[in-house]
């Protein structure tokens, strides 16, 4: 068996499983945020009085923080009331950060566990060797009530990555290139299992960027064997009691893809699909009005540093607003302590509180007609960041910073 099959077999108390099997798996951690908790709670209250285990549920406020409408405020009050009633202590409501950063940062993610969340980017935790995936509110309500849910065991695509990333090329470029190769639907209900020297050498921040975006080619989950950096990250959070799941030597895969990154250039996903990816040379010179640095994909400390290195001693173009959203309060604090936020302030960037910001087109940075944005977020769908007549390009943090300086999509090497 491969990694995902082994984890699902153990969680469903089976000796082995195969693609296409339906299993009923025990859940280790379940999560919902301020946008998805209320519909989950509404369904839950129709089927149960008490959650299965309040210590295994994590609630996070991140999509509309602070509340920007009465509706958002009402949603958050529903969640606060539910947490008190059910005795859920793991509620992060004071601008602590984006759920997919907060969960691993606060020690809720362990290798070889099964984690579900009412958000499609729950697949992020596969960077730690966990099987993690998003669910709809109805399915999550059943998890809150029973601690279990069903899965069809997915086929697995093996993604081998070798070579060294060049200057100004990061894991965001790698995952965009992989999505371009597979296509928006090429991984539908598949598990993407990442291997190779490049993956082994990636930092935790970089690995999370990759597993975060596997949903953009339709994948059920993305997963990696924890490397030394990952084990050190877990140890700093007091997590030492866990097992690392590796694939059998004769593990079966539906297909194997091999990528060599030695010559990879910065990649840009063009409107309005994430697989519409070009080398930066093809889109340089495209005028922008907005630049966004942050999100559950690229709002981590490493990402802020990459952007700051480009921005230092430069000013944001007068026709551009650069919005910076640290992925968590702890990242924000570290960026202050290390002088990174000062660089952003001196460049005339707008520093925003930790949260999802304009990524979902609801809060702080929503665009109107004919605006164009270069962003480190994960989706560039039609109308994703506001008006259906606006345009979103996706790139790595260095490209976002370089473009903010010039007012047009720019290769960082030209700054």
Image (cartoon, rainbow, N blue to C red):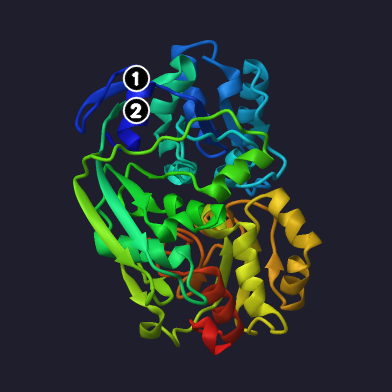
> In which image quadrant can residue 403 be found?
bottom right
Outermost residue toward the right in this view: 337
**Residue at screen point 28% across, 50% down:** 158
**Circle 2 crowding by C-alpha within 10 Å: few under 14, some 14–19, many from 20:** many
- CA gap between label 2 and label 1 equals 6 Å
- Does any portion of residue 149 appear in the rendered image? no
Circle 2: element type:
helix
Q: As rendered, which of 318 and 333 lies closer to the eye?
A: 333
Q: As rendered, which of 242 and 155 lies closer to the eye?
A: 242
**Residue at screen point 53% across, 89% down:** 414
> In which image quadrant can residue 154 be found?
top left
Q: Name the mark on residue 8.
A: 2
Left/right placement of residue 401 relative to residue 17 reads right
Outermost residue toward the top in this view: 49
Q: Are marks 2 and 1 in contact (CB under 8 Å)?
A: yes
Height in image: 15 above or below 308? above
Height in image: 147 above or below 94? above
Q: Can you identify the residue that label 1 sits on? A: 12
The N terminus sits in image quarter: top left
Residue 266 point in image, percent of width and height: 43, 75
Residue 313 point in image, percent of width and height: 73, 84
Q: Name the mark on residue 46.
A: none
Q: As rendered, which of 413 and 228 lies closer to the eye?
A: 228
Residue 290 point in image, percent of width and height: 56, 73
**Circle 1 crowding by C-alpha within 10 Å: few under 14, some 14–19, many from 20:** many
Height in image: 132 above or below 194? above
The C terminus sits in image quarter: bottom right
Height in image: 286 above or below 341? below
- Does any portion of residue 156 appear in the rendered image? yes
**Residue at screen point 38% across, 64% down:** 176
Left/right placement of residue 272 relative to residue 71 reads left
């Amino acid at each position: 068996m491969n990694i995902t099959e082994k984890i699902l077999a153990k969680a469903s108390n089976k000796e082995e499983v195969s693609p296409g099997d339906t299993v009923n798996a025990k859940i280790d951690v379940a999560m919902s945020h301020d946008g998805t908790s209320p519909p989950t709670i509404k369904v839950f209250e129709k089927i149960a009085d008490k959650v299965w285990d309040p210590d295994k549920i994590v609630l996070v406020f991140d999509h509309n923080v602070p509340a920007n409408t009465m509706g958002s405020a009402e949603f958050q009050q529903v969640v606060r009331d539910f947490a008190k009633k059910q005795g859920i202590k793991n509620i992060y409501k004071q601008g602590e950060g984006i759920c997919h950063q907060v969960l691993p940062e606060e020690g809720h993610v362990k290798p070889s566990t099964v984690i579900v969340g009412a958000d499609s980017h729950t697949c992020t935790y596969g960077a730690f060797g966990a099987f993690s995936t998003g669910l709809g509110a109805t399915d999550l309500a059943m998890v809150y009530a029973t601690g279990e849910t069903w899965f069809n065991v997915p086929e697995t695509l093996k993604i081998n990555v070798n070579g060294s990333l060049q200057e100004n090329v990061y894991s965001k470029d790698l995952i965009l290139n992989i999505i371009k190769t597979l296509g928006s639907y090429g991984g539908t209900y598949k598990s993407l299992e990442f291997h190779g020297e490049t993956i082994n050498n990636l930092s935790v921040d970089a690995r999370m960027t990759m597993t975060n975006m596997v949903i953009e080619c339709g994948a059920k989950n993305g997963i990696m064997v924890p490397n030394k950096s990952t084990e050190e990250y877990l140890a700093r959070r007091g997590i030492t009691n866990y097992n690392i799941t590796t694939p059998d030597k004769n593990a079966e895969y539906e297909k194997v893809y091999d990528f060599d990154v030695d010559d990879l250039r910065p990649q840009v996903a063009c409107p309005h699909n994430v697989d519409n990816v070009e080398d930066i040379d093809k889109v340089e010179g495209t005028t922008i009005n907005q630049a966004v640095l942050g999100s559950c994909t690229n709002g981590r400390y490493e990402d802020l540093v990459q952007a700051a290195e480009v921005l230092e001693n430069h000013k944001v173009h007068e026709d551009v607003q650069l919005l910076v959203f640290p992925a968590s309060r702890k990242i924000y604090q570290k960026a202050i302590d290390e002088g990174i936020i000062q660089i952003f302030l001196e460049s005339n960037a707008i520093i925003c509180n930790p949260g999802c910001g304009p990524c979902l087109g609801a809060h702080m940075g929503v665009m109107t007609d004919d605006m164009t944005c270069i962003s480190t977020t994960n989706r560039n769908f039609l109308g994703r960041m506001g008006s259906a007549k606006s345009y979103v390009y996706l790139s790595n943090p260095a490209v976002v910073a370089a473009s903010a300086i010039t007012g047009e999509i720019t290769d960082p090497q030209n700054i």
